[in-house]
Image (cartoon, grey):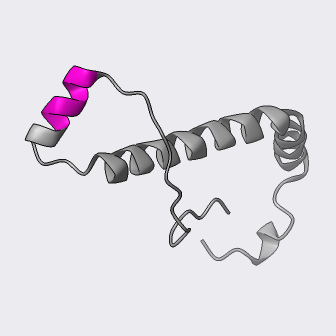
Amino acid sequence: MLKFDHAPKKATNLTLNVKVLALAREMGMNVSQTVDTLLAAEVKRLYWEQWNEQNREAVAEYNARIASEGLPLAKYRTF
């Protein structure tokens, strides 16, 4: 899920701190790639945060069932 590799790029206007942008360019940073990488990481983090919140009840019910009934195929486990 959430695979961003090989997605097409789209030109976008951003408003950035002038001093930070100047330093980034002085250091030879690829600003577009850096922003793209950091934005992708933040989107993934927020996605999973929201997923966990939306599915908190189902996960808790599943964990309670496993705690009371055990794992469904536990008798076949060899470890």
Q: Position of residue 65 (x, y in %)?
A: 90, 46
Chief SS of the magenta region: helix
Residue at image position (29%, 45%) is 31
Name the residue rendered at 52%, 39% in the picture.
Answer: 42
Specify the quadrant of the image occupied by residue 73.
bottom right
**Split into 4 quadrants, where in the image is the N terminus?**
bottom right
Number of numbered discs overlaid on the protein picture: 0
In magenta, the rendered stretch is 18-24
Residue at point 49%, 53% (across, down): 11
Q: Nearer the viewer, residue 14 or 41?
A: 14
Relative height, residue 20 to residue 1 (above, below): above
In this view, 41 is above or below 3: above
Q: Is residue 17 magenta?
A: no
Q: Choose between 69 and 56: the one closer to the eye.
A: 56
Left or right: 5 as drawn, with respect to 65:
left
Estimate the x, y position of residue 70 in percent, counting from the top left.
84, 54
What x and y, as percent, mark residue 45? Answer: 57, 40
Q: Residue at x 84, y 39 (%)?
A: 55
69 to the left or right of 38: right
Name the image quarter holding the C terminus: bottom right
Left or right for 70, reference 8: right
Q: Nearer the viewer, residue 15 or 49?
A: 15
Q: Quadrant of residue 68?
A: top right
In the picture, residue 75 is in which quadrant? Answer: bottom right
